[in-house]
Amino acid sequence: MEKWECSVCGYVYDPEKGDPDNGVAPGTSFESIQDDWVCPSCGANKDLFDKLD
């Protein structure tokens, strides 16, 4: 599973860790996160994330 980076603040979403504090279980791919999820660091919308190579 790919990691995704917030283009606003640089936060990296790691699917192995998820975002349990905001309802995203470890092992959840970025594509599977609900559309209203926001960056836990800066609050940017999900569509402001870019896939890391």
Image (cartoon, helix red, strand yellow):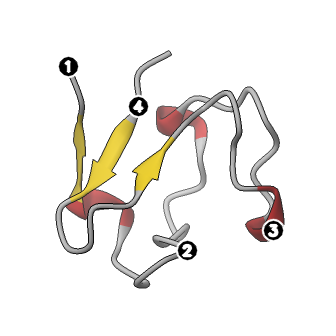
Residue at image point 59% right, 55% down: 34
Mark 2 vs 3, N-terminal side: 3
Disc 3 is placed on an element classified as helix
Labelled disc at residue 53: 1
- Amino acid carrying label 2: it is Pro
In this picture, residue 33 sits left or right of residue 3:
right
Structural distance between the alpha carbons of marks 3 and 4:
18 Å
Mark 1 vs 2, N-terminal side: 2
Residue hosting label 4: 3
* Viewer-closest of 12 and 1: 12
How many labels were placed on the picture? 4
Structural distance between the alpha carbons of marks 1 and 2:
22 Å
- Amino acid carrying label 3: it is Asp
Residue at image point 43% right, 84% down: 43
Mark 2 vs 4, N-terminal side: 4
* Residue 29 occupies quadrant: top right
In this picture, residue 1 sits left or right of residue 52:
right
Mark 1 vs 4, N-terminal side: 4
* Viewer-closest of 38 and 17: 17
Residue at image point 27% right, 62% down: 10
Labelled disc at residue 21: 3
Location of residue 5 with respect to 27 vertically, above or below: below
* Residue 46 occupies quadrant: bottom left
Structural distance between the alpha carbons of marks 1 and 4:
8 Å
- Amino acid carrying label 1: it is Asp
Residue 9 image position (x, y, % from top left)? 26, 73
Disc 1 is placed on an element classified as loop
- Amino acid carrying label 4: it is Lys
Q: Are marks 2 and 3 in contact (CB under 8 Å)?
A: yes
